[in-house]
Amino acid sequence: MIQDFKKEIEGLDAKAIISYVNEKWGDTAVFSTSFGIEDQVITHLLDQAGREVHIFTLETGRLFPETYKVWNRTLEKYGLPIKAYYPNTERVEKLVTEKGPSSFYHSIEDRKECCHIRKIEPLQRAIKGYKIWITGIRAEQSANREDMESVEWDEVNQIIKVHPLFHWTLQDVESFIKENNVPYNALHDKGFPSIGCQPCTRAILPGEDFRAGRWWWEDKSKKECGLHRTTN
């Protein structure tokens, strides 16, 4: 199925890809938004395409106030239903009780445990039963993502992943946001190209890698939480 999918969208731009997914796959497709600048572009295009694709976000409980603000602005502008998925309460309670609220700073293993509880498990619930998963990934975001493809099979989650903005540059994204008056997170204007949980995200310095502000204390980390791991 994935090879047929690749052929059908070959040569299409982001708007056409989203329209195709919306028309052919409809409510069997889902889009995950973290309200970052790329995701806001896709939300805008989904609104134009006809609103068949479902949208969700992962509410980790540790988001920036600016993220909640752009979430509200997005609802006001587009009126699209965005389903919030929260971590399992018992697992969060157990983690914080046993290791404290900042265990993710202690080791990579502890950070990955927190990411799994707050993001991975809710994500698995969010995409269960869908055939297509749309993301805002761009190739130039990190060396790790350059090795990905614009369409790929996610063996871990048994779903086709589509990245409509895969070949877009940051300038492409910023221009689209400005030209279409798309609401975006104010932190992007303060040196935050990648925005996740507040305790795990900082602004980057000139010349630093796009994802240097994520889990910055992990010098040897690949700067990924596991959401976009496609193989075991």
Image (tube, rainbow, N blue to C red):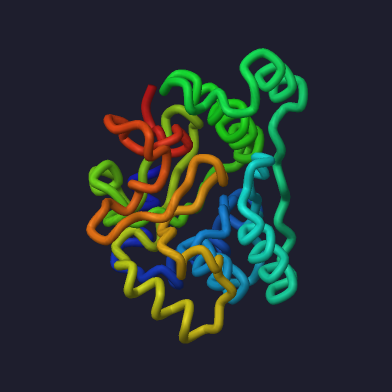
* Looking at the image, residue 65 lies above or below residue 76: above
Q: Which of the 4 quarters of the picture holds residue 174?
A: bottom left
* Looking at the image, residue 157 lies above or below residue 108: below
Quarter placement of the N terminus: top left
Q: Which of 22 and 61 is in front in this view?
A: 61
In the rendering, at what x and y percent does residue 196 appear? 52, 47
Residue farthest along the top direction in this orientation = 98
Q: Residue at x 48, y 27 (%)?
A: 105
Quarter placement of the C terminus: top left
Q: Residue at x 44, y 46 (%)?
A: 161
Q: Residue at x 56, y 53 (%)?
A: 34
In the rendering, at what x and y percent does residue 4 appear? 36, 50
In the rendering, at what x and y percent does residue 111 appear? 49, 26
Q: Which of 125 and 36 is in front in this view?
A: 36
* Looking at the image, residue 60 lies above or below residue 209: above
Q: Which of 180 and 17 is in front in this view?
A: 180
Compared across the picture, whether 81 is left or right of 28 comes to right
